[in-house]
Amino acid sequence: MQTSIPAGSYLVDPREIEFLLFEQLQIQKEFFGKKPFSPKLDQKLALELLSQAYRFAQKLGEAYQSADQEECRLRADGHVEIPSKFFSLWAEYISQWGVDPLRKKLGKADGERIEPLMPNVLSQVILEMFMGANPSFMTYGGFTIPAAKLIAANGTEEQKDIFLDNLISNKWDACFCATEKDAGSDITAVRTRAVGHQDQVYSIQGEKIYISAGMHSLTSNTIYFVLGQSRTARSDGYHLSCYLVPRFWWDSSAQQWINNNVECVKVEEKMGLKGCANTHLVFGRKGETKAFALGNKQNVGLLQLIPLMSEARVGTALFGVGIASSAYLHSVRFARQRVQGRLIREAFNTQNERVPIIAHGDVQRMLLDMKSRVEGCRLLVSMLCMEASRVQMMQAGPEVDRERLARSKRLVATLTPIVKAYVSDEAWRICETAIQVHGGIGYLKDLPIEQYARDVKILSIWEGTNYIQAQDLLRDKLGYGLNSLSMKYLNEDFKEFIQSKDCFPRFHTLFERVQLAWRMTEDVVLWIGKLVKEGQLTESTQFFTRCLFVIGTTCVAWKLLEAACTAQKGYENAESSEDMSFYEGKVKSAEYFIFNLLPSVECYHGVILDSKHSIFEIDSNQFNQTNRKFGA
Ligand SMILES: Cc1cc2nc3c(=O)[nH]c(=O)nc-3n(C[C@H](O)[C@H](O)[C@H](O)COP(=O)(O)OP(=O)(O)OC[C@H]3O[C@@H](n4cnc5c(N)ncnc54)[C@H](O)[C@@H]3O)c2cc1C
């Protein structure tokens, strides 16, 4: 079948991004011209940056399918081959989008060298484009800046001297190495250990698996942030240390870089993300692997790594929105071009004109489903990134309002597991729907659609599976809903939004539905607390994933309704029919989501509050067996 859609191309609707940043969130009013952001940053410059980012994203998109076909390979000499186009893309990426080139574009800002020049919410959409265009490529160096921030915050002066400039300039990159054969979700089972210690230098022995972008030749050195056990670690397994392991070690007596005995013994073959080298690494087998302990402190690694892991979780959500958004935009384009069948009321007569599939009710349903979910997920991430931008701004202010700062930080922490898990699950569903909209060609490799689904699935698994996120949310962030400060803050923000209800009589029913969902969400969280108080902690975990989904869905409905209100105002001043359609489309997203998808909150509310019946006990033997014989 012929299609005029260029294969592999990454799609964005710039109007959508402009609406989000400058109409709904109004970032120009809240952040531009304020410290610590670049004094040069205004709406015009932001738009220029976005256009440049879009152009680079399109280049990344051109290598999307070829990288999938080339994959990564381990050669017999231990060298890892990665997709060939990544080398020129990397050179362009670091020369345009590294910290230093960005400083050149934006001018000097106050503070440290890694100080943010733009609000987090603006970098959010730029990263969304890059990650959506070529997620495999973006895993290379993906941890570098968060790692530099960790060293800046925790490192010794010597460690800062050795690592900071090299990481910030992207000469070196960083990888996060936690997972081992027996230590996935259960990090307490980590067995990699520091075996020797001399002058603040440790010897590391152990193996790490699945490590993303773990070996390549894009940079001259790679710093592995390795979770390991020290000799003084307590036996509870939580007192792990973060060791900095350079792939090449500076031998000061020989005055040269020497191999630090980090071996790649396998490159995993996997379902998607094939341009990313997922490596099985072995430390200290062929010879000594030397390392520093971050800040020369041991047994506090998990605590030190929290900011890096949190950034990675938000990055996961951005990756999900980027891919899901392109999958949706491809689907709209395809549905406008693909002619198939007649409208149902005219189908009896073959003389009637055949129509593009976008005219069919069920295709419209799928497209609207994708549109509202994509916009909703992006808004959920923005909710977090707006708070993160406020944190950036407050921390740079002359007088810090400690209460407001603590509030914003808490909201960022609470929203982190929500965006990671909610967006990754939604992105997978959106990509699955995109295949359905495309029909047979969606299943073929001609278009990037099937690859989107394969690439996006990892997001619910890595950086802590989505259940681990739900556990983090319910236990650590919401304290099982008992006197939760996070719920109080979310509630305050929600109530503030609801006050605008009377200004939008057209949306009265939508407001009522969202208010009802909010009440149910609060009920659900409190119910978990009740179960825990009654001694049913283990049983209550059966609801954690659904509880996170309920909170995420209600927040998305709230933010989509907010977008509809902004669009209503925009519509009244719209200057073109194209703009009017755009604004009406925003209203349709909110209406569709609230009337078609938000009711799932009511359903789960019913299930969770009916815990007497819905909690189940099942013995492992009651699941099916595959070792039986017929007739036995
Ligand atoms: C492509 C890819 C890239 C990766 N990149 C990296 C990387 O760069 N660095 C790194 O360190 N790791 C990386 N990982 C590893 C990844 O983080 C782990 O796969 C993930 O944490 C899950 O661990 P696991 O695979 O051992 O699953 P398991 O922990 O075995 O989980 C299996 C299932 O059991 C559930 N489960 C486990 N424990 C519990 C519990 N206590 N309660 C309820 N349910 C539970 C899980 O939710 C999941 O559904 C990567 C993995 C992949 C596939």
Image (cartoon, helix red, strand yellow):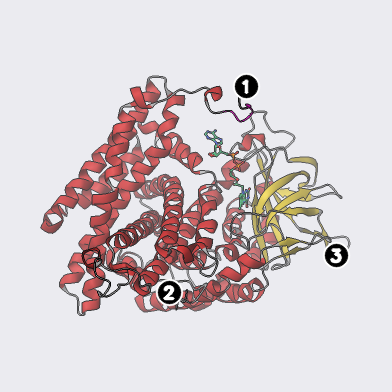
- Residue at far right of view: 254
In the picture, residue 231 is in which quadrant? top right
The magenta stretch is: 625-629
What is the C-alpha distance between the residues marked 3 and 1?
A: 73 Å
- Residue at far top of view: 534
Q: Is residue 161 above or below residue 284?
A: below
Ligand 1 lies in quarter: top right
Q: Nearer the viewer, residue 429 or 311?
A: 429
- Residue 632, numbered label: 1
Who's the residue at 88% across and 60% down the image? Answer: 253
Q: Nearer the viewer, residue 513 or 229?
A: 513
- Residue 255, numbered label: 3
- Residue 50, numbered label: 2
Who's the residue at 46% across and 51% down the image? Answer: 424
How far across and how far down the image is residue 538, in percent?
46, 25
Is residue 620 among what the camera can see? yes
User: Which quadrant, please, contains the C terminus?
Assistant: top right
Q: Nearer the viewer, residue 395 or 369?
A: 369
Is residue 27 among what the camera can see? no
Q: Secondary structure at mark 3?
A: loop
Q: Earlier in the sequence, mark 2 or mark 1?
A: 2
613 relative to 134 in the view: left or right: left
What is the C-alpha distance between the residues marked 2 and 1?
A: 67 Å
| Amino acid tagged 1 | Ala
In the picture, residue 473 is in which quadrant? top left
Q: Secondary structure at mark 1?
A: loop
| Amino acid tagged 3 | Gln
Q: Is residue 334 above or below residue 258?
A: below
| Amino acid tagged 2 | Leu
Q: Earlier in the sequence, mark 2 or mark 3?
A: 2
Q: Nearer the viewer, mark 3 or mark 1?
A: 1
Disc 1 residue crowd, few under 14, some 14–19, many 20+, Cα 10 Å? few
